[in-house]
Amino acid sequence: MPNQNVVSWTGIIDGYARMNQHEVALSLFQTMVGKVIKPAQITVLVIFPSIWNLGCLESCQSIHAYGEKNGFNDSDIQVVNSLVDTYSKCGCMESAVKVFAFMDAKKRNLVSWTSIISGFVMHGMEKQVVDSFKSMEDECLKPNRITFLSILSACSHGGLVEDGFEFFRKMVNECLVEPDVKHYGCLIDMLGRAGRLEEAEKMASQISPEITNVVIWRTLLGACSFHGNVEMGERVMRKILEMERRYGGDYVMLSKLFAGFGRFADAKNVRTQMDERNATKVPGLSLV
């Protein structure tokens, strides 16, 4: 392009970020700044996912300083909320708390509180989670299904099972938020990661047929594979095949589970079924 401007740079950076090519996105952002093209607020928002996907704390700090210098942090609540979220995901809760504390209390919204609470849960800071949740309610901000989904997801990844169930009960009984398949998926993933497979299977079986889907059982199958529970893995696989037969990843996971316990004939049989049903698996990618 003969005249590259902040709009064209933002567009190409956003494209790479959406395609999960985060190193390229961040490199382009740095090149743009090197060409003395000032990022706009939307450019900053676009690059945040690449920063936390790469865990690049230094870049987050640079964006923070740039926002302070150019007034983004005072004028755009989205930028500040994203800063809190990115600092948390880069492992620096101290900076996330500082950004949140300096935020204008009148501008704080539900996203602001969700971001800081999710960060606390992610880092196992249980007391801060409870205190922040109460403070949010004191400011008359009622958590919605997205707030609870974020918190339940963080509880799952943080291994905070009892806290997760407490938030789920609060969501249903106090906030009267109807749980959907994503909320149940977080609970099952949370139980599966903790090795509480029987509870996870029971919960999956009790979910209403109107809202359940194959992802619920696929999540449980992954937990069975991780913890080496062959018997439950077979039961879960039968459930999955009742809903969908063409996803190769399910067959591969069960085959590996059988092979891990020396049941090579069963593993081969699962692979044969995969080929006969023309089930395909998306190739895996890794970033080293």
Image (cartoon, rainbow, N blue to C red):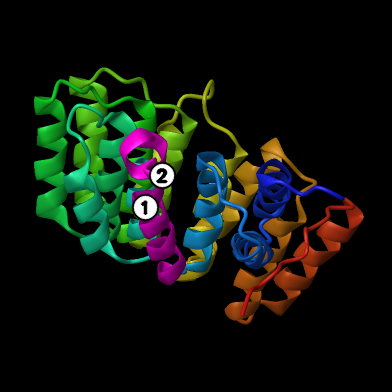
Residue at image coords 71%, 69%: 266
User: Residue reaching furthest top?
Assistant: 176
Badge 2 marks a residue whose secondary structure is: helix
The amino acid sitting under disc 1 is Lys
Residue that label 1 marks: 69
Query: In the displayed structure, does residue 51 sit left or right of residue 93?
Result: right
Place of residue 58 in the rendered image (x, y in percent of width and height, measured from the top left): 42, 71
Q: In the rendered image, which quarter is residue 96 located in?
A: bottom left
- Which residue is pictured at 50% across the width and 61% down the height? 51
Residue 181 drawn at (x, y percent): 48, 32
Instruction: Please tell me whether mark 1 or mark 2 is closer to you in this view.
Output: 1
Mark closest to the chain's N terminus, 1 or 2? 1
| Closer to us: 10 or 193 | 10
From the viewer's side, name the closer residue of 258 and 246: 246
Q: Residues within 10 Å of mark 1 (few under 14, many from 20)?
A: few
- Label placed on residue 186: 2
Q: Is residue 106 above or below residue 250?
A: above
Q: Residue 238, how many percent across, how many down?
A: 64, 47
Determine whether, in the image, residue 172 is placed left or right of residue 229: left
Q: Position of residue 250 (x, y in %)?
A: 68, 56
Q: What is the span of residues highlighted in magenta in the rendered image? A: 57-79
**Dot 2 alpha-carbon crowd within 10 angstroms: few under 14, some 14 to 19, many 20 or more:** many
How far separated are the C-alphas under marks 1 and 2? 39 Å
State the residue in front, 100 or 9: 9
Main secondary structure type of the part rendered in magenta: helix
Residue 192 belongs to the span the image colors magenta: no
| Residue 200 appears in the picture as rendered | no
